Image: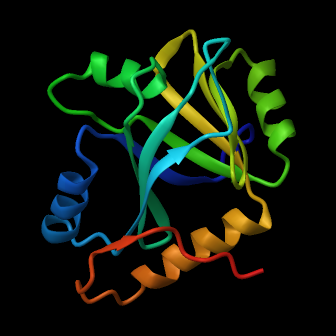
Amino acid sequence: MSRIFGGIQQSGYVVRDIDERMAFLSAKAGIGPWFVARNLRLPLCIYRGKEIELELHAALANSGTHQVELIQQISPEGSIYTEWLELYPDGSPMQHVSSWEEDFDGAVSRAQAVGWRLIQEGRSSYGPFAYLEHPDDPKLVFEVTRKGPERASIFQQVATAAEGWDGTDPIREGWPIYSG
């Protein structure tokens, strides 16, 4: 467990074709089922100090207790995701690890106190998120998200669906419904 970020719950990958990547990971790595939300428009997103309009597809699946996230940006504006794909044009390695914190502001403050810088932050329908990099290793990206009841419910349903998954129905459109 990180004293600064808390427990790492997720690995995130930026992809050029989310459908191809979900199909590959479900068929060739046995990870799934995938829950994919398409054409998500973030109500607020700030990239390197500039507010941007961000639209993307995002998919979630679990492998054991660890969640895997796939992100495909579909809007043209520059962001942390387009920046990553420019760095790795032939294939994207893991782009970030994520912790889910009830004390979101505390986690971000602890990180900033030891030199981490905000590179992209904003708000989704389920609360705030922040991506941070450190000047000593800017290719290591940590994401912190607020673990509110909505996000916790959705993430738990994704994890539960993966338990004993038999490979059927590998790609499911939309997020699980918040059960609060």
Left or right for 88, reference 101: left
| Quadrant the C terminus occupies | bottom right
Residue drawn where x is 75% and y is 19% of the image: 114
Query: Which of these two is toward me, 142 or 174?
Result: 174
Left or right, 20 with respect to 174, comes to left
* Residue drawn at (30%, 24%) of the image: 85
Residue 87 in the image: state x and y as whole percent: 29, 17
Residue 42 x, y percent position in the rendering: 61, 40
Which residue shows up at 47% across the image and 63% down it?
A: 66
Count of numbered circles in the view: 0
The correct choice, above or below, for 98 with respect to 80 in the image is below
Q: Nearer the viewer, residue 20 or 32?
A: 20
Residue at horizontal 52 percent and vertical 68 percent from the top? 175
| Residue 18 spot, x, y in % from top left | 28, 50
Image quarter for residue 147?
bottom right
- 170 sits left or right of 174 in the view: left
Question: Which scheme is used to colour this image of the protein?
Answer: rainbow
Residue 64 x/y as whole percent: 43, 73
Image position of 125 with respect to 137: above or below = below
| Residue 91 figure quarter | top left
